[in-house]
Amino acid sequence: MSQAAQSFASDNVAPVAPEVLAAIGRANEGTVHSYGEDPVTERLQAVAREAFGTPLSIYPVATGTAANALALACMAPPHGAIYCHDQAHVNSDECGAPEIYTAGAKLIGLSSPDGKLTAAQLAAPLAHAREMGVHHVQPAAVSISQATEWGTAYSPAEVAALAAAAHEAGLGLHMDGARLGNALAHLGCTAAEGTWRAGVDVLSFGGTKNGALAAEAVLFFDPELAAGFERRRKRAGQLWSKLRYLSAQLLALLEDGLWLRHARHANALAAQLAAGLAREGLQLAQPVQANEVFAHFPAGLSASLRARGFEFYDWPGAAQDAVPLVRLVTRYDQRPEQVEALLAAIRSA
Amino acid sequence: MSQAAQSFASDNVAPVAPEVLAAIGRANEGTVHSYGEDPVTERLQAVAREAFGTPLSIYPVATGTAANALALACMAPPHGAIYCHDQAHVNSDECGAPEIYTAGAKLIGLSSPDGKLTAAQLAAPLAHAREMGVHHVQPAAVSISQATEWGTAYSPAEVAALAAAAHEAGLGLHMDGARLGNALAHLGCTAAEGTWRAGVDVLSFGGTKNGALAAEAVLFFDPELAAGFERRRKRAGQLWSKLRYLSAQLLALLEDGLWLRHARHANALAAQLAAGLAREGLQLAQPVQANEVFAHFPAGLSASLRARGFEFYDWPGAAQDAVPLVRLVTRYDQRPEQVEALLAAIRSA
Amino acid sequence: MSQAAQSFASDNVAPVAPEVLAAIGRANEGTVHSYGEDPVTERLQAVAREAFGTPLSIYPVATGTAANALALACMAPPHGAIYCHDQAHVNSDECGAPEIYTAGAKLIGLSSPDGKLTAAQLAAPLAHAREMGVHHVQPAAVSISQATEWGTAYSPAEVAALAAAAHEAGLGLHMDGARLGNALAHLGCTAAEGTWRAGVDVLSFGGTKNGALAAEAVLFFDPELAAGFERRRKRAGQLWSKLRYLSAQLLALLEDGLWLRHARHANALAAQLAAGLAREGLQLAQPVQANEVFAHFPAGLSASLRARGFEFYDWPGAAQDAVPLVRLVTRYDQRPEQVEALLAAIRSA
Amino acid sequence: MSQAAQSFASDNVAPVAPEVLAAIGRANEGTVHSYGEDPVTERLQAVAREAFGTPLSIYPVATGTAANALALACMAPPHGAIYCHDQAHVNSDECGAPEIYTAGAKLIGLSSPDGKLTAAQLAAPLAHAREMGVHHVQPAAVSISQATEWGTAYSPAEVAALAAAAHEAGLGLHMDGARLGNALAHLGCTAAEGTWRAGVDVLSFGGTKNGALAAEAVLFFDPELAAGFERRRKRAGQLWSKLRYLSAQLLALLEDGLWLRHARHANALAAQLAAGLAREGLQLAQPVQANEVFAHFPAGLSASLRARGFEFYDWPGAAQDAVPLVRLVTRYDQRPEQVEALLAAIRSA
């Protein structure tokens, strides 16, 4: 697995953080009630409430796709519309998971160059829906990614503006927080400020990209929206019988701020990488506000780096791009030397 | 958690087997490709093929409900019928998971006192479906549990008779093997003899009840049936990004027969328990062919045992039962002394 | 088509009543707004409210399967349970329509010899659901057929007892009234007494079996339950653009009691038939309380009648039946002589 | 209803053509077998085969939404992608019908100013899907509208180019022919040339907009794709028991070319209207190739015309439009004087 140490492909290539593995080990004593009636899961509720500073409900699941799709299924009827960025993970990378979980609600993708939606963008599609009446799906929710798929972060004010527009039209606001920690680390705001205080109703909280084995969660800041969640999770095959092992992972991340330390570390490496690329004269496609760097690499450069064992994805860029786009992801488990090694390889290429 | 040591409630209250936890630890080195393109998952394919003696395809998922529902979704169209025992886990305990995954296929429950279906039972509903034509769902699959929800095991000949009837009518045969190891340990036959050689087309292989953290798998003995499985798994939110940790668990169980040793151990405890109950004059409701004991306990006895910290479930019995029914489950992690402690408590009650 | 004049196969083999066809013709003048914003549909609302004596909402659709499935989709979540007779049309003859419209809710069939459910039958499955919690689908609705699939009719008191049990447990009561007119004609009670006053929440009102071309309706006695109905109807492809032609059919049936005159006529023929069969020494399997006669015909008799052009269905009887069962349906458009012709053929056979 | 005579709102405000009503009346004799086993439906098969010059299968349904959604459900799996114009009826005006019928397949909308797709537009999304693998829905079908939602018509060569691109990538080609007659009348080609000879696999054939009461059909040029159609139609509540009355409508349209005469008539009125608008100095937004005219009307003009009883829809135009857009639809039942009346009102406004 050594060459993979040079991977900048994704957060998901990383191993599990030792703290998370240790927490699983600690949970592994004796018998406990199954399906979440265990002390670890109980403690997770308390710790999550403290981390977010509000009496939320938290439900652990194993994948981010499940977290997003279950969250949206609680927010939109089968005949509902969910507005999101057209390149949002829920719209593009989940093979129709929101569609199966919501029983056919429609994701309506809106465009922007930086992965962010604005309140102004909602006006036209909402007006269209109103005019169309029963012929059109019913506006039900807005879903945003934090950080976005382009590695950018919404400020609390931007989230609040979107939330206000959504709420005024009777829609809920969902946040796909697969990289919430990275966004918060960049913004320097609290979890509360970045989510429910800014108007987020339901949050998909990401753990796996941030050091967990497989652990995400759905957080309802409005408990009324959670009605039906538990049966939806069960019928989706997402309720673990040995739930303590999901909860233990999330606990390990949340309990003493490990998730934010991991995120800060990954963000710092991304900043280091971005600065280095700029020094080499390579153009960045997006501001770096999390742990993803989008840069224009000449095809020869990419080939040369891959020949040396570096891994990263080509990324669909704009039609007018002269130089191809790549995505480089930094991780909690990487060291600055690994970023330097990549930069050195770029220099020598 | 100490009182839970006296739990006979379910296989799921158990912790993770040390061998499984160790395997997770061993998989936790360095970066690997995500979503299953890793060496652990690759090795799982080879080991599973060896364990079952046939070139199958194996797909790990985290829960038995997911394994069953995904398997059935590959076997039945939305307008299909799946015949199963009316108390089958898929029909009664999965909150409609087969329905969401198949997009509405209908489970048609058939009755029998011991949890087993017979080929003869299929004749009438299949004839009815033929007569009804498009007004009725289309017969598509038969699903059986091995061991059954009543702790009984189908012999290979019984499976083969069902498979022959199903196949003759154009239906596939699915086996919910959440306790397959226990059934095989009882039957003394190989995994091959108990499954594909007897005509099983698709198998849900259980790990979690048998010492895993959260690990099940869908095995296709007929690779054609697996078409579409991978996208179905993804859109169900059941594809782990760090799939190596699912695969490692299954590897640990399969690699050197740990799953069968665990199953034999639990079965032996169930036999010990059943013999003890009989000695105390308590009536068994079913033959004990796996790790579950169904016995008639006077209400006072159950109350007394629970007062001492023993845990087990009341179970819906037959309408004519004079003495209430309880279910007692034994596990890989229990010791004979724990069974003796329960029997001693019964004697003194 | 002459031999079909001897058909006792189904209500659906009948042509459209002249009054209904005339009403379609009358509606066929000039342009009107589409999708239900037309004067005919407006008038239907008023007439239906008068016929049922309550401020209901009525939504026309073209088939009974659509009416039932849309009604149930408004009453049960995807993770819901709907209790019905196991031979109910919704459970057995609609190829999974409730499942697609509800997005996978589960129909739980209960047995009885006469097609009717009782409040007492609900107790056990509801208790089971409570015990199982999230592992089991959530009790949401009871659906009964009036008249039943066995040609029997619930008295208002029987409906009220079921409604009370359902409501007490938080479930709604749906009535599949494909043959509601026949049941009311037999019971001699008003539409109000037979439906909402007895506790029915949502009614599928049948027109097609009773002289319409293709016209059924969903009636909500509780307007709150209708939330979402209109979009559900649209996304099901059940919203006619030229809705006036659906509404005109229902108007023709409801406006001056034509539906009840038709039903009384068909019932009278069924009574005539039943009396004649009894005179011939043939055994009836059910009391005749609508327009269906279930009788035991020796196989030779059925063959002989069919050879003379009579049409009727063999029907699945009880396992212990010595003589096969057949179903004979009488219709609004038949004449007493046609019943006599059948009886004469039986005598001479 | 008199003011509605000035309606240019939609094809659907029209009454039923007398020939269609007469055909319903002729079908209304005696009893026939239900659910399509009747002589009218049998004859429809033959007449449709002759009209299209190929051994197709034709299945009548009552609405265009149902026809489209059922067609697409036979072409795409739940995890499939269907490429269409982003303003296509299936994507925008059916409240998620394709999503419910396909069980969650994803419609991916592509943009163009005239409502038409080109083969070149498919390349990028298909390449994206290939790269994304299981994370993305699986390309399954292309759906085009003929005539388009912008009143334009694909030439047979344009259809053929799209079909070639779709087929090469393993996708089927669906045509929403709600206004197929209008397109063919404009193109001057045969039904065969405009559909299957150009590569269309499945056609939604529109009758309701063209003089029927409620009658559309799904035509499979490739009989293999129809597998499962009949049960899908039944479980959707789209199978009429008295199917003869659906078939009779379609027969009346197809039998002697009435559908094409109607379409030519409506097209001629649209051409008359377009020419008149141009004479008045009003700008057309699209070429007029069917029975729809898209024109830029100053807001005052629209208000003035509406005050005089004329009806038509405002239409969402391009962001840069200075003058608002309206849609005017002409119909089989209108007379040239009605178009002249509108033009006269414009002149005097």
Image (cartoon, coloured by chain):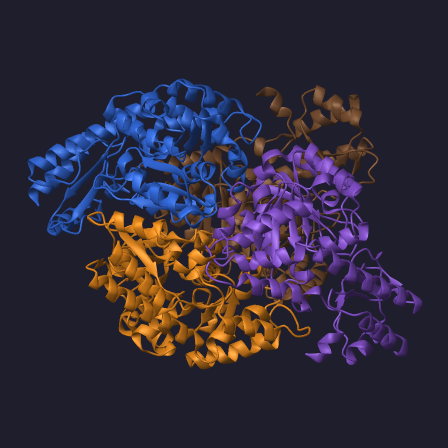
Chain colours: A orange, B purple, C brown, D blue
Identify whether D244 is placed above or below B326: above
Say left or right for A86 vs A61: left
**Residue at x-position 19% and y-position 48%:** A320
**Residue at x-position 72% and y-position 42%:** C288
The quadrant in which the C terminus of chain C is found is: top right
Q: Position of residue A153 (x, y in %)?
A: 30, 68
| D75 vs B8, nearest the viewer | B8
Q: Position of residue C62 (x, y in %)?
A: 48, 41
Q: Quadrant of residue D283?
A: top left
Identify whether A217 is placed above or below D159: below
| C235 vs D4, nearest the viewer | C235
Q: Quadrant of residue D72?
A: top left
Q: Position of residue C246 (x, y in %)?
A: 43, 41
The quadrant in which the N terminus of chain C is found is: top right
Q: Is residue C105 visible?
A: no
Say left or right for A115 vs B344: left
Q: Quadrant of residue A152?
A: bottom left
Say left or right for A143 vs A58: left
Q: Is residue C8 visible?
A: yes
Q: Position of residue A268 (x, y in %)?
A: 32, 71
Identify whether C177 is placed above or below C162: above
Say left or right for D188 vs D230: left
Residue lying at the far front in this picture: please name it: A348
Number of numbered callouts drawn: 0
Identify whether D73 is placed above or below A210: above
